[in-house]
Image (spheres, coloured by chain):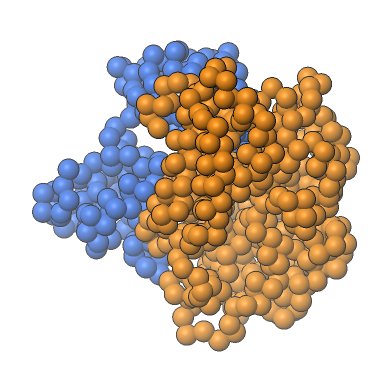
Amino acid sequence: MPTLVSHPDEVKIVTSRFGLGAAEIDRYIELGGYQSARQAIEKGPEWIIAEMKASNLRGRGGAGFPTGMKWSFVPKQSEKPKYILVNGDESEPGTCKDHLIFLHDPHSVIEGAIIAGLAVGAKTGFIYLRGEYRYLLTIMEKAIADAYAKGFLGKGIFGSSFDFDIISQTGAGAYEVGEESALMESLEGKRGIPRIRPPFPAVVGLYGGPTVINNAETIATVPHILRMGGEAYAKVGSERNGGTRLFCLSGHVERTGVYELPMGYNLKKMIYEVAGGIRGGRKLKAVVPGGSSTPVLLPEEIDIGMDFDQVGKAGSMLGSGGVVVLDETVCMVEFALRTIKFYQHESCGWCIPCREGTDWLKKTLTRFHAGAGEARDIDNIRYLAENMLGRTFCPLGDAAAMPTIAFVKKFRQEFEDHLDGRPCPYAKQEELVGA
Amino acid sequence: MSLTNVAVNPKAGETIFSPELAARFDKLVTLYPLRRSALIPMLLYAQDEIGYLSDAAIAEIAQRLEITVLDVRNVLTYYSMLRTRPVGKFNVQVCTNISCMLRGGQELFEHCEKKLGIGHRQTTPDGLFSLEEVECIGACSWAPAAQVNYDFHENLTPETMDAILEQYRKAGQ
């Protein structure tokens, strides 16, 4: 069982029921659960969307798109049924927050999906978890069955005239399926390859119907926003970045764990105070601020507020909230190689710049790390990555290219140090065979 | 391997799965707006029951969903958790992605290789264990982590890994 952590600076909203047995429906109700759904039925779609817009909640999957605005894009009238799709395909390396939400507070996801359904006029919601989260699907399925038994799902929910059904399932191992259009393909029983946009899912989505796709954390936040009021929620965070965020601290910090902190919380403070600083009193070397696809930050770049705008201004991205901390012992070439190996493995192969680019980057970095690199390889790595940017249907190509460019740019010296003919002590020569 | 429905064509009403799973499949195919949507869950549940996706399992799933065997194979080869060959009773999946790598995931994987005497995607001669180096499994803050079948194990060291493997060994005998 993943361990829960706590720090006085935390503002527990989404995590407020963690560790309190809220996976049981009666306990969830006792803790104020399903009040927001009742309120949403009473007050109607316009009120819900107004509160969501006022909350400044931005998508927690990584793109940071304002949730209220996303919901308002769904056409009111539609010939085809509309759908809510909860993206719990949490797969961005460094990210493990939805894991805890499904484990400790599955009903918040159900309640959020109901509210999203009421807001846009959808009668069916899907909760899609990554394949590895089978034990969490079992928890989710029980929660859904319990909600049906209470009349919170199904026909005439909460005694109203609204119907809402939820279907939950897992994937079967594919990072790419976390991308919204590939997720819809997977849910339709196909390979997870991206769709071309426009049309956007809000207009033509799942089964051709208008579809709202939100990250599980985003959806789990919704009932709390209605309970607190959109404005009050917005005030917890920073400008244009409402509320809190679940930050997953991993790597070389003393106290790894998932902490719920206000948007805009200082990254340096997060590492040195909340997570207890660098393990063993070592020196900080680098921070990957929002999951493996976000450009690395140097120690002198981390005195910033953790919200979508401030991290963007610092040249990286807030991403999925996975803060990976690296101490001085890490070989950055090896780290870059491990990162690109992941993207090479996960590229679906649909777009050539991504398929070929990730493969050549992996080959070059493998050779380089093994001590067989040449000086021109350094620029070639950057050249390859830069030519992947913006040339693919989905952001996986960018997700592989952006961190690679940053590794080369910010740690060029370390790449050059690999040119002395001696392989890095961590290198595995045999990787050349499989590359 | 059969690429058409002809080679392993199950007769209507017959199933290679347990009555419980067959009943579950009957329900699954009606659950979604589109019958085919049940494909990935069905493949997973079939694999859970028989250990891998045999030609017969693929053929029956294709028939139940009214799609071709080729359609099913086209999808199943995309997903890393789906397999067409048997694995050991306990599939040990060690994460070596960045967060785990920083906390000894690679060393943990190598330790398992030595301990079990097998490499990536290999199975012990007694059929008890398989080993796999996997990508991020969503346990980054509790790294290094591994999954044995669907069970998560977090904050691992070579010593705790040994104890876990021993428990499975006992359970499997």
- Residue name at image x 85 percent, y 68 percent: A231
Q: Position of residue B140 (x, y in %)?
A: 63, 36
Left/right of residue A131 with respect to residue A116 in the rendered view: left
Tell me which chain appears blue. B
Give the residue displayed 49% in from the left and 40% down from the top.
A361
Please tell me which residue lies in front, A12 or A365: A365
Q: Residue at x 17, y 43 (%)?
A: B1
Q: Nearer the viewer, residue A37 or A374?
A: A374
Q: Position of residue A380 (x, y in %)?
A: 52, 42
Chain letter for the orange colouring in the rendering: A
Q: Is residue B58 above or below residue A166?
A: above
Q: Is residue A435 visible?
A: yes
Q: How many marks?
A: 0
The quadrant where residue A20 appears: top right
A18 and A301: which one is in front? A301
Q: Position of residue A353 (x, y in %)?
A: 45, 53
Q: Quadrant of the C terminus of chain B?
A: top left
Placement of A259 over or under A70, stated as above or below:
above
Q: x, y (%) of residue B19?
A: 28, 47
Q: Is residue B30 left or right of residue A428?
A: left
Residue A42 appears in the rendering? no
